Image (cartoon, rainbow, N blue to C red):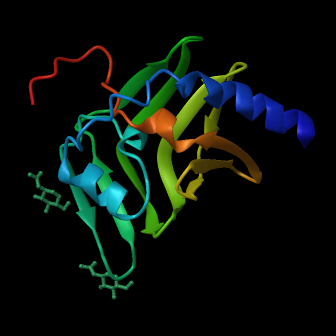
Amino acid sequence: MTKLFFLISLILLPTTFTSQSEKQKPPTAAHTELTNYGFPIGLLPSSVKNYTFNQTSGEFSVDLGSACKITLPPDNYLATYSKRVSGKIVEGRIAELDGIRVRAFFKWWSITGISSSGDNLVFEVGMITAKYPSKNFDESPQCEGKHSSS
Ligand SMILES: *[C@@H]1O[C@H](CO)[C@@H](O)[C@H](O)[C@H]1NC(C)=O
Ligand SMILES: *[C@@H]1O[C@H](CO)[C@@H](O)[C@H](O)[C@H]1NC(C)=O
């Protein structure tokens, strides 16, 4: 378990590419909704086309227009977002997450849940968790290989 924790740490560490000084404005209403629940906007790419949110159940679905690929510098780990990312959000916690994966060590790892304590984010990959400073996610990443026309 300890070994795996370090493995996941290696996967997620490269997200330290934003400087904390240049905090971005939420690019879409879906990003604003994230911040309303205590999460940073960098968890979603900037290309959100549409989203639905049921305030009663917390169930959400984000439409990115197409599947989205993001390379996380400096070590160039690949992350993918499905065209549709869904889950269930309450204050400080996203559960039943579906649609975000990270490629490392020749395998795809699905991120199944994320919780936020304000300063830190805890990512869940199945039963394994890894903690990162929220400030690494202050900027919403751009999808690769596409024109930023909208
Ligand atoms: C946004 O999603 C909802 C629910 O799937 C759908 O009814 C609506 O037409 C969509 N809006 C756009 C602009 O795609
Ligand atoms: C929102 O969630 C509640 C509780 O699960 C459900 O009863 C309701 O039908 C949902 N509303 C929509 C518009 O899906």
In this view, 150 is above or below 145: below
Specify the quarter for ligand 1: bottom left
In this view, 107 is above or below 23: above
**Residue 28: x %, y % from top left:** 19, 46
In this view, 118 is above or below 100: below
Query: Measuring 44% from the left and 24% from the top, which residue is drawn there?
Result: 19
Q: Nearer the viewer, residue 137 or 85?
A: 137
Is the N terminus in the top left, top right, bottom left or bottom right quadrant? top right
Q: Nearer the viewer, residue 18 or 109?
A: 18
Query: Measuring 52% from the left and 56% from the top, which residue is drawn there?
Result: 118
In this view, 62 is above or below 60: above
Q: Is residue 10 left or right of residue 19?
A: right
Q: Nearer the viewer, residue 19 or 11?
A: 19
Residue lying furthest front: 21
Residue 56: image quadrant is bottom left
Q: Is residue 63 left or right of residue 57?
A: left
Query: Measuring 24% from the left and 44% from the top, which residue is drawn there?
Result: 26
**Residue 85: x %, y % from top left:** 39, 49
**Residue 98: x %, y % from top left:** 49, 51
Residue lying furthest left: 149
Residue 146: image quadrant is top left
Residue 35: image quadrant is bottom left
Is the C terminus in the top left, top right, bottom left or bottom right quadrant? top left
**Residue 33: x %, y % from top left:** 29, 59
Query: Measuring 20% from the left and 40% from the top, which residue is drawn there?
Result: 27
State the count of labels: 0
